[in-house]
Amino acid sequence: MIQRIRTLLAIATTSFCLLGIQSLQAQDRDRVFPVKGPAVTGKIVEKNRDKVVIEVRGNNQNFPSNEILRVLYEGEPPTLSRTKDLVAQGQIEQAVDEFKKIDAASLPSEDMKQDYQFLRGYIAGTLATKGKGDPKNALTLLTNWVKDNAQSYQFYPAAELMGDLAVASGTPDQAAKYYGGLAAAPFPELKTKGSFLQGKALMASKQNADAKAKFQAVLEAKLSDPVSLKFQKMARIGIIQCDALEGKATEAIGELEKMVDEGDSTDGELFAELFNTLGSLFAAAGRNEEAVLSYLKTDQLYGAQSEPHAESLYRLNQLWTKMGSTQKAADAKQKLEKLYPTSPWVRK
């Protein structure tokens, strides 16, 4: 009898311990999905704009914010999780439909509410930069979010998108300030990209000397990662543009053509920038046929780059109108309006 009681007590104690472990595990179900490697499950114990720290079985793991695809929280509704997943995959149109299913009022934590508001602005902003939404409205959503969440691990993508939206809204001087948030990141690839984008915005604001200084700083930085090296090439294009504005157009065209010959044509972002810049220099020199060919390369080969693609269609419409090819001009305009209905290039 005594032995039986001891056995029952042991079973009960074991069961209680197991329940305790299961309860603890149930509370530690936050997840961090890094860019590389498997998701990590545990309890998030710290977050700021530079990192997320998750405790896994008593040990802390640090994830730099630029290496995080998404973060999920314990008890998060599936609609919110799926929206994050779609955004991380770049499937923004699908994310719109999933986002509409989220019941914002019932989200059980401040973390989830913060992510909901970020997604609201980020989805609207991404669509607007593709010419499918109002950039000013999206910019307002994101600036309001940043005011309350300046230390979020999602700060840097928000800062970049805010700059893009300011450019799309026709305020490149404001964009340079937003890109400054990206340029202040401790991560070389974000810092390089932010400085390059600041240079572009300053050039669009006709502040060529300041723009050239930004591009030059990018070129002189000692960098080795592939993303930073790519933006050094983009900065070189920016300096060439500045040189052309200072009366060195012929030399600028030659340098750009050399970059085309020596570059990796699979890099759509780089080559769309190259061909659009060549097109602008050819057009400024009155070499309209060569300008058309350059813009056509962006149109036909790099249409996935939405902003330079929209610009190329606008420029083709202008050039073909000037050259008397009215049907081709009309086709370019129709394509621009169909693909990017709210783009600033449509409103020019």
Image (tube, rainbow, N blue to C red):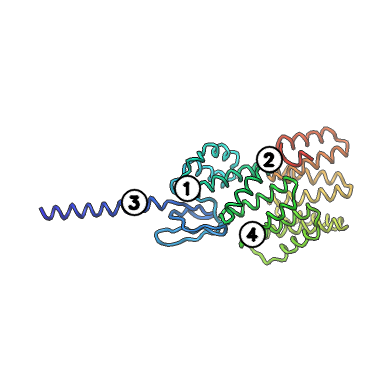
Q: How many marks?
A: 4
Q: Secondary structure at mark 3?
A: helix
The residue mark sitting in front, 2 or 1, is: 1
Q: Secondary structure at mark 2?
A: loop
Q: Quick one: label 2 or label 3, which is nearer the N terminus? A: 3
Crowd rating for badge 4 (residues with CA inside 10 Å; few <14, some 14–19, many 20+): many
- Which is more N-terminal, label 4 or label 2? 2
Q: In the depicted view, which residue is nearer to us: 294 or 6?
A: 6
Instruction: Find out whether the residues at labels 2 and 1 contact each other: C-beta distance under 8 Å.
Output: no
Circle 1 residues within 10 Å: few <14, some 14–19, many ≥20: few
Circle 2 crowding by C-alpha within 10 Å: few under 14, some 14–19, many from 20: some
Task: Write down the residue under mark 4.
Answer: 189
Left or right, 181 with reference to 345: left
Q: Amino acid at mark 3?
A: Gln
Q: Which residue is mark 1?
A: 109
Residue type (three-letter) at the residue carrying disc 2: Asp
Picture residue at 62% right of the left edge, 48% below the top: 144
**Residue that carries the numbered disc 3 in the rendered image:** 22
**How far apart are labels 2 and 3 at the CA level?**
48 Å
Residue on which the image places disc 2: 134
| Separation (CA) of disc 3 from disc 1 | 22 Å
- Image point 88% across, 39% down: which residue? 322
Distance between the Cα atoms at labels 2 and 4?
Answer: 29 Å
Q: Quadrant of residue 9?
A: bottom left
**Which residue type carries mark 4?**
Glu
